[in-house]
Image (tube, rainbow, N blue to C red):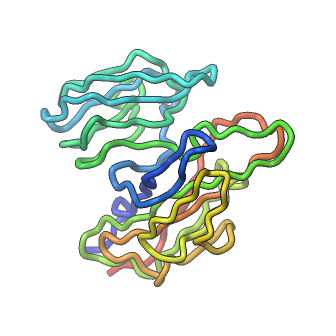
């Protein structure tokens, strides 16, 4: 069966720091997807699953319209919709207590205003560069790692290439592929450049071996550059995974 676009997923690394002093990178965390998914406008967030077995807690963290970080725990009730009380302008992370049994739809205000889905056996999603802050006096470079994975179990993506999309924060973020697939390289904190990649740029960049076989994955380091005294931005970053498949 051919590799579909839905099979190509960006996952978090084991260490996704929320400050500039904690470890960044490491092995893949295939339970957490990396996304900039947000409600279309400030909204309370609703959860509903396709399985009655998804009666568990979810911790939702984001920012309100004033830019303050807010968080809450919502008790899910399987196929019955449950809505939090906080109003979010943007979502920073959404983490389930245990892997989803069904597909959990995360929506702004109502199921029709879908933000994203949490698939079965996964634990949630989050943004990279959580709470990244510019310096008042100098340029800041921050580095975080994600993984591109082919979730198709049998088919290969040939001529597998990663390209930056010219939208959002594309002029602030460059990327570089790790020198080996499935690498577990980390750095002491996200202010330190990794030594396991080539130069950072906008791409396109071919995966190691120019392919992603079934269930294979490639580490990608991202570099965020912020100028001195740069103001806060509510934006996003996109990459495109392309290739050929039988």
- Residue 138 appears left or right of 84: right
The residue located at (69%, 67%) in the rendering is 201
Position of the N terminus by quadrant: bottom left
Rendered image quadrant of residue 147: bottom left
The residue located at (37%, 19%) in the rendering is 84
Rendered image quadrant of residue 75: top left
Query: On screen, 101 above or below 151?
Result: above
Position of the C terminus by quadrant: bottom left
Q: Position of residue 117 (x, y in %)?
A: 34, 42
Front residue of this view, candidates 160 and 15: 15
Q: Tell me how many marks there are.
A: 0
Query: On screen, 223 above or below 20?
Result: below
Front residue of this view, candidates 17 and 49: 17
Q: Position of residue 143 (x, y in %)?
A: 62, 55
The residue located at (55%, 39%) in the rendering is 18
- Residue 33 appears left or right of 19: left
The residue located at (24%, 75%) in the rendering is 154
Name the residue at the bottom extreme: 209
Query: On screen, 229 above or below 163?
Result: above
Rendered image quadrant of residue 176: bottom right
């Amino acid at each position: 069966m051919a590799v579909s676009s839905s099979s190509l997923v960006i996952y978090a690394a084991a260490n996704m720091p929320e400050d500039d002093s904690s470890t960044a990178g490491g092995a893949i965390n295939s339970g957490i997807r990396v996304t900039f998914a947000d409600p279309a406008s400030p909204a309370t967030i609703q959860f509903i699953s396709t399985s009655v077995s998804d009666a568990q807690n979810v911790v939702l963290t984001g920012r309100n319209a004033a830019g303050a970080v807010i968080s809450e725990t919502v008790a899910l009730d399987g196929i019955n919709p449950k809505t939090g009380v906080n109003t979010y302008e943007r979502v920073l992370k959404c983490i389930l207590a245990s892997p989803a049994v069904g597909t959990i739809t995360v929506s702004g205000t109502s199921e029709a205003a879908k933000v994203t889905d949490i698939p079965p056996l996964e634990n949630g999603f989050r943004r990279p560069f959580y709470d990244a802050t510019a310096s008042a006096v100098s340029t800041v470079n921050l580095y975080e790692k994600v993984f591109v994975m082919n979730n198709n179990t049998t088919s290969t993506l040939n001529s597998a290439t990663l390209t930056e999309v010219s939208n959002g924060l594309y002029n602030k973020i460059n990327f570089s592929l790790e020198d080996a697939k499935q690498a577990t390289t980390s750095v002491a904190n996200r202010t330190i450049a990794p030594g396991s990649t080539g130069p950072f740029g906008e791409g396109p960049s071919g995966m190691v071996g120019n392919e992603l076989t079934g269930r294979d994955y490639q580490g990608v380091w991202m570099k965020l550059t912020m100028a001195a005294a740069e103001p806060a931005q509510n934006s996003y970053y996109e990459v495109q995974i392309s290739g050929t498949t039988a």
